[in-house]
Amino acid sequence: MKQPPKLTLVNDPIYGFITIPGPLIYNLIEHRYFQRLRRISQMGMSYLVYPGAHHTRFHHALGALHLMTQAVSVLRKKGIEISEDEEEALCVAILLHDIGHGPFSHAMENSIAENVTHEYLSLLFMQVLNSEFNGKLDRAIAIFKNEYPRKFFHKLISSQLDMDRMDYLKRDSFYTGVAEGVISSDRLIAMLHVKDDQLVIEEKGIYSVEKFIVARRLMYWQVYLHKTGIVAEQLLVKLLQRAKELVQSGDKLPGSDPLLYFLKNQVNTKTFSKETLDIFSKLDDYDIISAMKLWMDYDDFVLRNISKMLINRELLKIKLQNDPFAEKEVNSKKEILQKKYNITDHEATYFVFTGHISNQAYSMEKDTINLLTKEGIVKDVVKASDQLNLKALSEKVIKYYLCYPKSDY
């Protein structure tokens, strides 16, 4: 294991200088599996809506690591015993929590791999790294899997108020320029405490929690579920699905070796071997962009035109409404496209399609954000809040969309 410089700092636009805590973390960051995250977009295709949204999973992982070191420091000052080994494990777990993301973050999960989630792949990466680092990730993996005895550790990694969410809300609002997503991570972390092995927020931090929940809701509607972003992401998913369909029918598509491997093979959790993981570790956004540029001249109508749409930002139109779209309206738009370009019904489904999105800023059903009152009582933040809108924000809102070509297509 390489010895890092005496003090390793990273200059981050959100937090200023981030200190890398120790040689294990340093060497994990230096590993090629982690360096791949420099080439994985944090927000997928959102840069087509917000030009500044070109930050990566690498940025986000370092930011979440920084917040974790702050959280541990705060909890120790409040008398919560956390050993040096436990702190290191928490840092490793949060650093690697997103290492399994594929190109453009979520697109691959819904296209060229079958139900292989980034959480599943993150765990696989951690297990392989654990072998390389002689078992030094054992405790981090136990925390990541929620198998460590001190359950509040996992809540710092994955919950409704974890270091992951705190960083991505603050970071994504910064890079998109959407001020509504700005949260006070310093204030939220300063209010952290532990009661009966539960992660809680001290009662005086209630307004910061309310702001956090509202900010999350606004960021979902304005950024993560922006209608143009939805179109772009769905087109990317459909592009990869079409590419896989063509390759498996015998077409020899141009593309990088890692991309072609996933197009040629049926990849699922049962077939995801260590060799497959190694190939996956060489796949990133650049493979997809390079392929799209090549596919813009391919003779398949679907592949050619979706590639042009994404490269040139000439996207489909999208309609949003509260109820599902009538089958008659969908079929009518498909028929128009079929007649105009003499394509099949199946080909038309790549350009005319429906789906739904949902937004639930806070869930009262499980994993609640709990407040610790001055009397030592633990309460759900919604029940403790005098803001009536927090209960409304816990309701899931579902909207339906219809995507179809513009009239001049």
Image: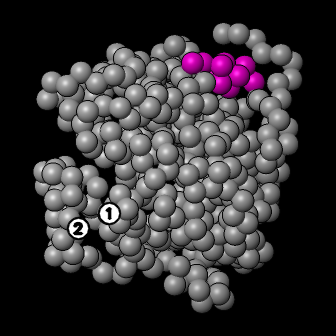
Picture coordinates of residue 224 (x, y %)? Answer: 53, 60
Specify whether 385 is left or right of 117.
right
Residue 328 or residue 222, whichever sits in front: 328
The residue drawn where x is 37% and y is 79% is 321
| SS type, badge 1 | strand
Specify whether 328 is left or right of 96.
left
The residue drawn where x is 58% and y is 81% is 390
Picture coordinates of residue 140 (x, y %)? Answer: 55, 33
The residue pinned by badge 2 equals 333
Instruction: Determine if the magenta segment contains residue 344.
Output: no
The residue drawn where x is 46% and y is 28% is 290
The residue pinned by badge 1 equals 404
| Mark 1 and mark 2 residues within 8 Å of each other at the beta carbon | yes
Amino acid type for the residue under numbered disc 1: Tyr
Q: Is residue 229 visible?
A: yes
Q: CA distance from mark 1 to mark 2?
A: 7 Å
Q: Which residues are magenta?
A: 22-32
State whether residue 53 is above or below residue 378: above
